[in-house]
Image (cartoon, rainbow, N blue to C red):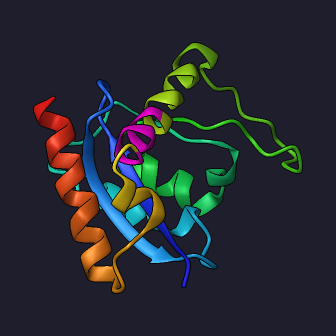
Amino acid sequence: MTTKVHAIVDALGNGLRLALTPGQHADSPQLPGLLAALPTAPGAVVADRAYDTNAVLAAVALADAEPVIPPKTSRKQQRAYDINLYADRNKVERFFGRLKEARAFATRYEKTAASFLAVAHLLAALDWIR
């Protein structure tokens, strides 16, 4: 069984929201639900090219945030985005790197999705304490 962990992090790289989906599901449909769960509107949403869909851009606009998502090369109208702000996307990668320091998360010892998500939440909370 494969799964994907989706995360929203703040400007400091601290995990705010986590979601778990089956491995074969696409990444971009998860973003509107994660954005809707945030208590306050973000100033900007920084994501990679895979999130450049009309549904994601509409959800970001609904949250009154700036989309910092590079456009796919197949788009007829190429959007401008802040390249300097896009460089902060590595904070998500570093967040997952810190979670993967725990061997139980990196190798996924848990048998059920609920217990794996619980471990992810526990590790994210421990990451806040660091």
Quarter of the rendering occupied by the C terminus? top left
| 57 horizontally vs 44: left or right | right
x then y, percent, for residue 43: 33, 30
x then y, percent, for residue 108: 42, 69
Residue nearest the viewer, comparing 107 with 20:
107
Give the residue drawn at x 72%, y 34%.
79
x then y, percent, for residue 12: 29, 24
Residue nearest the viewer, comparing 75 with 51:
51
| 72 horizontally vs 63: left or right | right
Q: Decide: is 37 above or below 84.
A: below
Q: Which residues are magenta?
A: 94-100
Instruction: Find residue 106 and report its image quarter.
Output: bottom left
Disc tally is 0
x then y, percent, for residue 11: 32, 26
| 49 horizontally vs 10: left or right | right
Residue nearest the viewer, comparing 81 with 101:
101
Instruction: Find residue 86 and report its image quarter.
Output: top right
Q: Residue furthest left?
A: 129
Q: Is residue 88 magenta?
A: no
Give the residue drawn at x 63%, y 26%.
81
Give the residue drawn at x 49%, y 23%.
88
Dominant secondary structure, magenta = helix
Residue nearest the viewer, comparing 53 with 123:
123
Q: Decide: is 89 above or below 103.
A: above
Give the residue drawn at x 63%, y 42%.
48
Q: Residue furthest top?
A: 84
Quarter of the rendering occupied by the N terminus? bottom right
Q: Decide: is 23 above or below 5.
A: below
